[in-house]
Image (cartoon, rainbow, N blue to C red):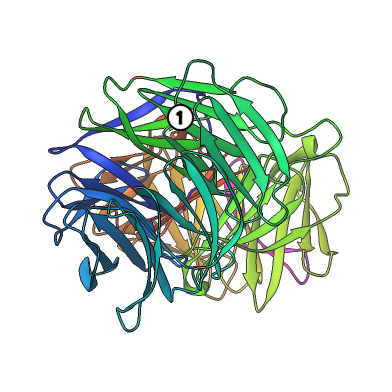
């Protein structure tokens, strides 16, 4: 999962050349699917652009793709006149739906995953029961049906485009409101709005009332594709070889971004994240575009505009935890990438004074440790109380610190030492001293074991779980940031082979410079200056 992560704005940061023409796109979380002229469907990793799978089943051009709301299933329509339901995890065909007498040009799956809608050149909309594979309603139209789309929130409601006419239907095949002009359509993620385009006009309307929310115009253009961003703020439209991006919160008549680079007709567009866009073209390419993150209004504060100050990965709990400069702690589900909980807190000092921090969930209690000046504040975020205020002047500046796995100790990396502070007493219970100070150090923690990393030397580790003031140095114990002899290089944002030192994975472009990151051999979690978080599952990215 990725949340924005802007760095350079309005640029194409990756182009994937396909063996066959990429004709349609769909995306869910970290996966992009591309329907090909051959009938095959390929999957791409959204971060790297690497091809991860090929789905074979259709015998002719794939014209439409749609994920189920939970991302476990994929629906496809094809010129072979069939609709297929796929298991995303295995890549296998679950069911095939027969009935259309001409090409299938659009498919959609209902929010409750019980019904598939399809539109065809045979001038019909068909509604299919997924469980029985039977078509329970056929809606006759006057011309070719080239768009059908269920509301993402209401499984009883869908819209269609046929012959430049937009119609609204319920699940029983009854038209629910008068038709209006349009050539392409898209719902907002929450289903409260939809956009319809015709010729030069882009109209955003309220889904319930039909009231026009905002209207834009592209001079001398014929719009063929449109879509909403995941946060519902942006709309992308495509005509011929150009993509325009619009801000729905503004009445400004001009697009905020215009992307050119395709040399042939654009066949599909989609938003993988609020600040990135992908487009496919008949020139055999899929392009990945960066979009500027919108600034918050002067009177409001965007919840994702504050710089990430800390990232903690707790894979055993299936969560990552972030803390930002607006004093908001968030927990993230690492399997879905969704924010599980948010904890706004009130600081005791200015955000500019905060030097570094760490947050950990221990026994359903969030512990946040922040360092400012020469003082360490140990804070129970959930209760909004300070547990301890520790004087950290003994060894001067604190470079980094981490909370132990059981939440009883805070490990502080000082000028020439690692000190273990008790959360109960606020006193030093153990420490390690160095002969010299190396720049650029940081800590990683696994339970009571601590490693100090430096660009100039190999990582050094100690076990602070042994009795006594002085911990035991680790010699051959595996690093917590190691998997199959691969090491995460925090400073360079890359993974290296521990033996050959060859770089096997690199965060690049807009992902290149996270403020904080952690990697446990499977999950990489990184926080950015934009206030957004990247979660990458290396089970799906081969290194």
Q: Position of residue 506 (x, y in %)?
A: 33, 38
Q: Which residues are magenta?
A: 412-431
Count up the numbered dots. Answer: 1
Q: Residue at x 74, y 41 (%)?
A: 302
Give the residue number, with chain letter if any, for mark 1: 223
Q: Residue at x 35, y 68 (%)?
A: 73
Left or right for 164, reference 231: left
Left or right for 109, reference 390: left
- Camera sees residue 413: no
Q: Is residue 37 above or below residue 460?
A: above
- Camera sees residue 415: yes
Please tell me which residue lies in front, 428 or 314.
314
**Figure quadrant of residue 196:** top right
Please tell me which residue lies in front, 489 or 91.
91
Q: Residue furthest front?
A: 142
Q: Residue furthest bottom?
A: 132
Q: Position of residue 51 (x, y in %)?
A: 22, 47
**Figure quadrant of residue 390:** bottom right
Q: Residue at x 29, y 57 (%)?
A: 540
Q: Is residue 254 above or below residue 214?
A: above
Q: Position of residue 179 (x, y in %)?
A: 57, 49
Residue 480 sits inside the magenta stretch: no
Q: Residue furthest top?
A: 220
Residue 426 sits inside the magenta stretch: yes
Q: Position of residue 418 (x, y in %)?
A: 58, 53
Q: Secondary structure at mark 1?
A: loop
Q: Main secondary structure of the magenta part?
A: strand
**Mark 1 Cα within 10 Å, few/some/many (few <14, many 20+)?**
many
Please tell me which residue lies in front, 456 or 239.
239
Left or right for 188, reference 11: right
């Amino acid at each position: 999962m990725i949340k924005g992560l802007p760095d350079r704005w309005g640029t194409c940061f990756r182009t994937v050349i396909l063996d066959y023409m990429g004709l349609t796109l769909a995306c869910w979380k970290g996966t992009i699917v591309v329907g090909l002229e051959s009938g095959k469907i390929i999957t791409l990793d959204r971060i790297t652009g690497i091809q991860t799978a090929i789905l074979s089943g259709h015998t002719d051009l794939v014209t439409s793709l749609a994920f189920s709301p939970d991302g476990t299933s994929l629906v496809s329509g094809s010129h072979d006149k069939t609709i297929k339901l796929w298991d995303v995890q295995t890549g296998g065909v679950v069911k095939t739906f027969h009935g259309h007498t001409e090409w299938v040009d659009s498919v959609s799956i209902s929010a409750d995953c019980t019904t598939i809608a399809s539109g065809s050149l045979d001038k019909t909309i068909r509604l299919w029961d997924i469980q029985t594979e039977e078509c329970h309603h056929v809606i006759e139209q006057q011309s070719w049906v080239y768009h059908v789309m269920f509301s993402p929130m209401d499984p009883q409601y869908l819209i269609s485009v046929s012959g430049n006419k937009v119609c609204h239907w319920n699940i029983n095949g009854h038209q629910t409101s008068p038709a209006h002009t349009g050539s392409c359509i898209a719902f907002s993620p929450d289903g409260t709005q939809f956009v319809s385009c015709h010729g030069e006009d882009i109209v955003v309307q309220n889904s319930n009332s039909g009231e026009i929310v905002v209207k834009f115009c592209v001079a001398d253009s014929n719009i063929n594709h449109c879509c909403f961003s995941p946060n519902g703020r942006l709309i992308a439209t495509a005509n011929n070889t150009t993509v325009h991006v619009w801000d729905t919160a503004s009445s400004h008549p001009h697009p905020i971004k215009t992307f050119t680079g395709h040399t042939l007709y654009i066949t599909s567009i989609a938003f993988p994240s609020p600040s990135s866009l992908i487009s496919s073209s008949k020139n055999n390419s899929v392009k990945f575009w960066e979009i500027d993150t919108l600034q918050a209004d002067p009177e409001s504060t965007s919840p994702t505009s504050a710089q990430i100050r800390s990232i903690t990965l707790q894979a055993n709990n299936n969560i990552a935890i972030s803390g930002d400069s607006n004093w908001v702690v968030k927990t993230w589900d690492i399997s879905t990438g969704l924010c599980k909980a948010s904890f706004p807190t009130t600081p005791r000092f200015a955000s500019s004074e905060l030097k570094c921090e760490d947050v950990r969930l221990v026994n359903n209690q969030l512990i946040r440790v922040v360092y400012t000046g020469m003082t360490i504040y140990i804070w129970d975020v959930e209760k909004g109380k300070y547990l301890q205020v520790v004087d950290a002047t003994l060894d001067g500046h604190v470079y980094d610190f981490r909370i132990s796995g059981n939440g009883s100790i805070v490990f502080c990396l000082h000028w020439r030492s690692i000190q273990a502070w008790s959360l109960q007493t606020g006193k030093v219970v153990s420490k390690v001293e160095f002969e010299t100070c190396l720049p650029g150090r940081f800590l990683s923690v696994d339970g009571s074991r601590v490693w100090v990393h430096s660009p100039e030397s190999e990582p050094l580790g100690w076990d602070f779980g042994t009795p006594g003031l002085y911990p035991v140095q680790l010699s051959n114990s595996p690093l917590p940031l190691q998997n199959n002899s691969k090491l995460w290089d925090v400073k360079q944002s890359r993974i290296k082979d521990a033996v050959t030192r060859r770089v096997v994975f690199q965060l690049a472009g807009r992902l290149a410079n996270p403020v904080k990151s952690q990697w446990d051999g499977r999950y990489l979690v990184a926080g950015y200056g934009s206030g957004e978080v990247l979660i990458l599952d290396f089970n799906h990215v081969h290194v």
